[in-house]
Amino acid sequence: MASVKKEFFDRYDDNGHIVMHIGEVFCRVPDCSSQTKQFSHTGNLRVHIKAHKDLTLPGRAKGAPSVEDKNASIAWYKSLFAPPKKMAVPFTKAGNIGIKEIKDFLRTKHVTQFPCESCEQANAKCCATPFVCEYLDRYYDVEESFDRPE
Ligand SMILES: [Zn+2]
Ligand SMILES: [Zn+2]
């Protein structure tokens, strides 16, 4: 069985047992065949985790989870699902989209193909066509900067 990276679980108790979050139903062990399987409840996940011999679980906590535990769980779930923060679209002094600045940035991401596929298909000006350009969509907060066209 593959050894489990310690970092994969963000919380351990003082005894080195993993601390599962409230309501956690996915196995977090990399390459686990059950990784994409959703367990019906945390109890079933606990049973599954025991199959990972190098992980140990603490005894079941008695009573209701503490506020601290609940808050840690909420923060953890948020970190899983929060989209990466996107940048504001740059504009020139004249109020146009700052294409040069965008392309300069894209080069730092090793994006060198212009137009992008979406702009090519739509025959749109790459980096200057919000809601079409996939580069804008990937790195910039297009929703924040433009009204979605009807
Ligand atoms: Zn597993
Ligand atoms: Zn484009």
Image: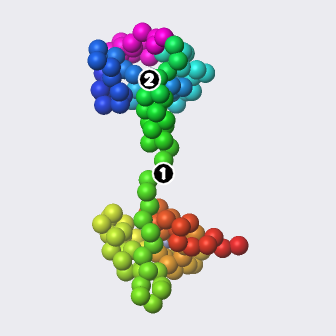
Q: Residues within 10 Å of mark 2 (few under 14, many from 20)?
A: many
State whether residue 35 is above or below residue 113: above
What kind of residue is marked 1?
Pro
How far separated are the C-alphas under marks 1 and 2? 23 Å
Q: Which residues are magenta?
A: 47-62
In this view, the residue in front, 70 or 120, is: 70
Instruction: Looking at this view, name the residue that lies furthest to the bottom.
Output: 94
Residue at image point 41% right, 88% down: 93
Considering the whole magenta stretch, tell me its main secondary structure. Answer: loop
Q: Is residue 115 visible?
A: no
Query: Could you tell whether 4 is left or right of 77 in the image?
Result: left
Instruction: Looking at this view, name the residue that lies furthest to the right.
Output: 150
Q: Residues within 10 Å of mark 1 (few under 14, many from 20)?
A: few
SS label for mark 2: loop
Within the magenta stretch, is there residue 17?
no
The label on residue 20 is 2
In percent of width and height, residue 8 lies at 35, 30
What residue does disc 1 label?
83
Q: Quadrant of the N terminus?
A: top left
